[in-house]
Image (cartoon, rainbow, N blue to C red):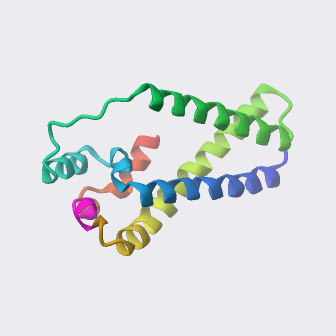
Amino acid sequence: MSVLTIIIECLILAIPFSIMVTVLLNKDPVNMITDYPPEIQAEYYRSQGLEAKKEKLTAKNYIAKAIFMVVALAVVVGFAYLAGARSFLDGFIAAICYCLALFAFDTFIIDWIFFPRVILNTNKKREKICAEILYMRDCRLDFFHILNGV
């Protein structure tokens, strides 16, 4: 397996991941509220008068998630093959590298840098939605993703 190819592929994977997160956050910032600690979620729903409202997954959600999983699996398998993985163990190691790279990118770049500095500061409509999320430093959100990722 080529380590350089895996690194390049990790960088390539970060691009559509960033686009996906940015589009979803711009479309509906509340859509990502479940990625935050339970305290922030509870405070957000309480402040919006939505504590009794629970969203249930519909058949459309399940189908979309299943399609995404199949596409993601195909991409990971294809990238692992391009990196030179010819055995299950090589493919597994490559897949772990891709997951760890995206996890690190999501935590350190998107959650710590991009989200607080760009998303929260660019749209005034998000002030109500994100006011509770802004106290994430008090809730140690920085380490929430890391602990959940481990």
Query: Which residue is situated farthest in the front direction here?
Result: 60
Q: Is 36 within the magenta?
A: no
Q: Nearer the viewer, residue 50 or 113?
A: 50
Q: Is residue 23 left or right of residue 45?
A: right
Please name the predominant secondary structure of the magenta segment in the image: helix
- For this view, does 70 lie left or right of residue 55? right
Query: Is 17 in front, or is 55?
Result: 55
State the image coordinates of residue 24 (x, y, percent, origin top left): 46, 53
The picture places residue 100, in percent across and down from the top left corner, at 59, 46
Residue 131 part of the magenta-drawn span: yes
Residue at left offset 33%, top offset 49%: 33
Which one is nearer the viewer's eye here, 60 or 102? 60
Please identify the quarter of the rendering in which residue 68 is found: top right
Picture coordinates of residue 83, whole percent (x, y): 83, 44
Label count reads 0
Quarter location, residue 67:
top right
Read off the magenta span: 127-134
Residue at 64% over, 39% down? 96
